[in-house]
Image (cartoon, helix red, strand yellow):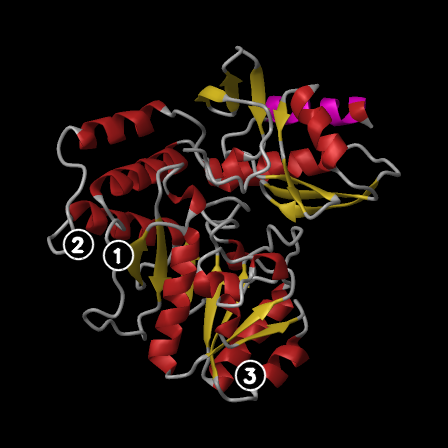
Amino acid sequence: MELFDVYSLFDVTPVRAQGCRVWDDKGTEYLDLYGGHAVISIGHSHPHYIEALSKQLGKIGFYSNSVVNPLQQELAHRLGKACGYEDYSLFLDNSGAESNENAMKLASFHTGKERIIAFSRSFHGRTSGAVAVTDNPKIISPFNANHKVTFCTLNDAEGVEAALAQGDVAGVIIEGIQGCGGIHIPSDAFMLKLSELCREYGALLILDEVQSGYGRTGKFFAHQWSGVRPDIITMGKGIANGFPCGGILIAPHLKAVKGMLGTTFGGNYLAMSAAIAVLDVMEDEHLIDNALVTGDYLVQHIPSSPRIKEVRGRGLMIGIEFNEDVAPLRRKLLFDKHIFTGVAGTNMIRLLAPLCLTKAEADVFIQALKDIL
């Protein structure tokens, strides 16, 4: 049997990692500025993280959600304090896409409505509902297209109000910062107006913080830069530093009904021990502050070049937009300079480094980019 060939693979086989460094099977060392799609939040192979998972595996690794799991309650308490939403409730699942599915389902349950508003250039996942609100026709099958979705333009409040006026909108889903769509940041004024419009028209505001959350932008969630308080916040990626985990934070005015949501693996003992260890390290090592300081430093020192159109982002969620296809540049960074980066579209290098990135490591990338340019 062979693997289903859907991924374009680089000829690199990582076998070991530590902090922001990765080593392949030939012993080559790489600087990781992508963190496996923003998943590695506290750095690879953190000793505390390894210890927490190892100890938990020696006790109990899994049982269903039909019994009390104190680690879920501990994570909910710790997470509420860390992000400032102590009055919200937590529902745990396995991934960002699943979190977005559950958020939209909850919005529909609560309002009795069926339409969702999303935004151009958005990406919310590859499961049925999540892919339907993703602005990428290449990954939307005919089955996915059955969902009722209206796409609006980011930062166009009038367009959103016109869509809301149709009267059948359960919720508006928006990324804290658009990641796959090209590091586009909703303006603070737009976010505040969006929140106001959702209240006026009886729709729920859903903040997708799967990529932009968990300290990546210098606040716990990217939307906190604008001061809005969403009805639902979705999480994934960095929540457990590589162990599959996701969740949604739910405002207190949304009431739970037994059986409304459910999951087999969500909130399992290993995922919870991983997620709690992530919060331990983030707090002890001040990684949210570091993300802001090191991210600002990196942006300020990216070399100017006629080949670069614009640099944008917040914290360690950075996009470098070029006036050319970046595929050759990304290959040079990987194979000549031994630096992992990501892309968004065809013209942007995307940086989503672990939050423990140092200025010295940022300098390695800055010099490498200067050399190539």
Q: Earlier in the sequence, mark 3 or mark 1?
A: 3
Q: Residue drawn 30% across and 64% down?
A: 87
- Three-letter amino acid code of the residue under disc 3: Leu
Magenta-span inclusion, residue 160: no
The residue that disc 2 covers is 65
280 vs 68: above or below:
above
Q: Residue furthest front?
A: 1
Cβ atoms under marks 3 and 1 closer than 8 Å: no
Q: Position of residue 174 (x, y in %)?
A: 54, 64
Q: Secondary structure at mark 2?
A: loop
Please tell me in which quadrant of the rendered image residue 256 appears: bottom left
- Say few, some or many: other residues with alpha carbon within 10 Å of mark 2 (under 14 / 14 to 19 / 20 or more): some
Magenta-span inclusion, residue 361: yes
Q: CA distance from mark 3 to mark 2?
A: 37 Å
Cβ atoms under marks 1 and 2 closer than 8 Å: yes
The residue that disc 3 covers is 164
